[in-house]
Image (cartoon, rainbow, N blue to C red):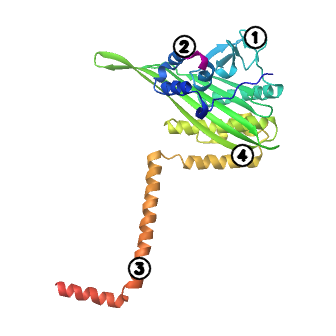
Amino acid sequence: GALLPPLQPTLAMADPQLLAALDLMRRMPPSRCETSLEELVDLVPHLTDDLLNTIDQPLQTAKDAQGNAYLLCDYNRDGDSYRSPWTNEYDPPLSDGVLPSPKLRAMETLANDIFEGYREMYYEGGISSVYFWDLDESSFAACVLVKKDAEEKKKLEAGNWDAIHVVEVRPLGPKRAAYKLTTTIMLRIKTGHAVGVHEGEMNLSGSLTRQKEEELAVGDVASHVANMGRMVEEMESRMRRHAGLPTSPNLSSSLPRRWRTGCATRCSRSTLARRRASSTASTSRAVPRPTRRRICSLRRSWRRWASGMRTEEASSRRLSPPRSERCEVVRGGARASG
């Protein structure tokens, strides 16, 4: 089948108009991201594909012919149709739509089942979708989407969490592969606000993007899903800590059963032991950022102070008279000053 274009254009070689459009989008309120993008597309229609591939938008939901809910993004779009990860069909129907190869489709089906359990454990609801596509003959990419809408409670009128994880996978040999993960999280909260007799509302929204690259061992097809799953979970946990949100204290126990026990990923006991050790280490590192900075500063100050004391002590040993003579000098000086 046809191959999709690269994930993002190289900004160093991009069109100056594209760079200006991206710079303008960074200065627009995140709450009107969709409106701003539509206006940019009207101004520079020849950059439509580049803008849609580069700018992350709040996720939209839809239902396929069987009633399964799925998320819409640019990676499952072909023209005006969107492909469902559950039925592998486009809506509206498209006869020549781009479909993943049978090998990628098998990984896509497995990833949707596993990330559905991941979503239930971490988000306790919401919608998740995973899409795979070919980059070239040996490389492929995947997109993991998670959307959770907050329930209206008291003064909370609306709120949603959109997580977009894009993973590029390039083989390095028969048993290793390079993974490049780009994660964007968009958060929006709308609450009622009242001061005395005056009523109003507060609309808070923003986005955070992080990137990570790793080289991991690869066994069978399911090992790709396991590697991407661990990277996504670790990245989300790190970004939650950065935003001051609670995270799972035990990484291994939070994984879905098929993910944790390894019946789908062939994880060995040593891998689980290393994962538990890393989760214990990550728990010990879960110190607020100012505290860690203060500890590092104190350690540096202590090292400088200790090295200075050693230098002064060494110089005093070389230049000062013996201890008995020093005592006589001190006594004599004290008697003279008295």
Q: Amino acid at mark 3?
A: Ser
Q: Which residue is mark 3?
A: 315
Please provide the residue range marked out in magenta: 41-47
Q: Which residue is mark 1?
A: 94
Q: Which residue is mark 4?
A: 272
Image location of residue 213, percent across then percent down = 65, 41
Q: Is residue 149 above or below residue 327?
A: above
Q: Is residue 41 above or below residue 208?
A: above
State which tag comes first along the sequence, 2 or 1: 2
State which tag comes first along the sequence, 4 or 2: 2
Q: Which residue is mark 2?
A: 42
Q: Amino acid at mark 4?
A: Leu
Residue 43 sits inside the magenta stretch:
yes
- Quarter-wise, where is residue 168 in the image? top right
For the residue carrying disc 4, how many other residues have a C-alpha within 10 Å: few (<14), some (14-19), or many (20+)? some
Image location of residue 172, percent across then percent down = 77, 43
Q: Which element type, helix, strand or loop, lies under badge 1? A: loop
